[in-house]
Amino acid sequence: MSRKAKGKRPNFFENPEVDRVLAIIMAVAGEVSVLRDRLDTMERLLDSRGVLTRDDIEAYRPDDAVEEERQAWRSEYLERVLRVVHHELESEASGESRQQYEDTVKEHQKELSEKLT
């Protein structure tokens, strides 16, 4: 179950877009921190049980197939993380402006509001 704070989010910067980006970065940083702790736990357990040592992990060199698989995953991951930036660049390249986007959103909100009343 997802938990959310009620009420309006506080703004720390003059530009609310900066607050959104910071929120995304902090969410990713939190995920990386959790992953780091879990990886550390796995390494310690493997080492203590004699399955492999931390030196084994440090010495590991992936072959070309593994590197290819990792690169594919990284590309897909970065595409997901940067999706909003890619969409914005595509919109700019096709001649769409931020104002057109906002006008379209307002128009749809108005239409929806009229349908609900």
Image (spheres, helix red, strand yellow):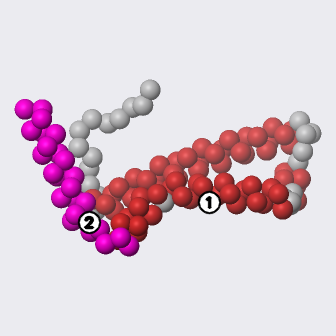
> Is residue 65 shown left or right of residue 25?
right
Quick check: 36 above or below 1?
below
What's under tag 2, amino acid-wise? Arg
**Quadrant into which the C terminus falls:** top left
The numbered mark at residue 83 is none
Q: Secondary structure at mark 1?
A: helix
Q: Which residue carries the number 1 mark?
A: 75
Q: Residues within 10 Å of mark 1 (few under 14, many from 20)?
A: few
Of residue 100 and residue 84, the one placed in the foreground of this image is 100
Please report the bounds of the magenta region as a residue range. 93-117
Q: Residue at x 41, y 61 (%)?
A: 87
Q: Residue furthest right?
A: 50
Residue 42 placement: quadrant = top right
- Residue lying at 27% horizontally and 35% vertically, measured from the top left: 6
Q: Is residue 91 visible?
A: yes
Amino acid type assigned to the residue bearing label 1 in the image: Ser
The residue sitting at 89% across, 53% down in the picture is: 56
Tell me if 32 is positioned left or right of 95 in this view.
right
- From the top left corner, tell me how far across and down residue 63 is, in percent: 86, 60
Whether residue 58 appears in magenta in the rendering, the answer is no
Q: Could you say which quadrant of the image residue 19 lies in?
A: bottom left
| The N terminus - image quarter | top left
Mark 1 → mark 2, Cα distance in angstroms:
27 Å
- Magenta stretch: dominant SS? helix
**Which residue is the site of mark 2?**
98
Where is residue 77 shown, x and y percent of the image? 58, 54
From what the image shows, is residue 39 above or below residue 1? below
Count of marks, rendered view: 2
